[in-house]
Amino acid sequence: QVQLVESGGRMVQTGQSLKLSCVASGRTDRVYSMGWFRQGSGQDREFLAGIIWSEGLTYYNDAVRGRFIISRDNAKNTLTLQMNNLKPEDTAVYYCATSGPEQVPVTDIGSYITWGQGTRVAVSS
């Protein structure tokens, strides 16, 4: 069992940067991948970025590739999302999530079984 707690969300202005963190506790040795997702008002939750926990191999949604960077610190069981050049359309609740131990498609939201509570990001124009 893994528990996830996100932090770092706040209101920023267009063009600014923000770093989100997700601290995992519990059986992180049983995790294949971790990912960041977001859900805007009235929208479906979407995949942003994912990482294979043991290898560090990363995957991105084309919509954020080049602006967002996912990274992890295995020793601290922490997943981060560095978001640069933020835009109003990035306004959403951001979630981190983990898969189970099996190898699964990292970009598929259905691969993720444990979710954090979310942290809200608002980007003003």
Image (cartoon, rainbow, N blue to C red):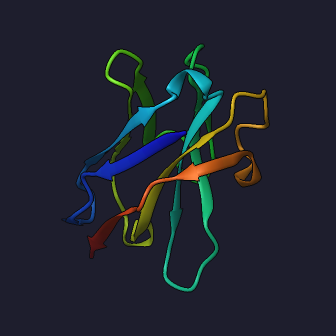
State the image quarter where residue 46 is shown. Answer: bottom right
Q: Could you say where residue 68 lies in the image, as x and y percent from the top left?
A: 44, 43
**Image position of 42 with respect to 102: above or below:** below
Q: Could you say where residue 102 lies in the image, as x and y percent from the top left?
A: 77, 28
What residue is at 67 percent from the left and 47 percent from the top?
112
**Image position of 72 with respect to 64: above or below:** above
Pick whichever, 116 or 43, lies toward us.
116
Pick whichever, 14 or 47, lies toward us.
47
What residue is at 78 percent from the left and 27 percent from the top?
103
Q: Could you say where residue 48 lies in the image, as x and y percent from the top left?
A: 57, 50
Q: How many numbered circles are shown?
A: 0
**Image position of 21 with respect to 124: above or below:** above
Q: Residue furthest bottom?
A: 42
Q: Could you say where residue 23 lies in the image, as x and y percent from the top left?
A: 34, 38
Q: Is residue 26 left or right of residue 54?
A: left
Quadrant of the snapshot with the N terminus: top right
What residue is at 30 percent from the left and 71 percent from the top?
122
What residue is at 33 percent from the left and 67 percent from the top?
120
Quadrant of the snapshot with the C terminus: bottom left
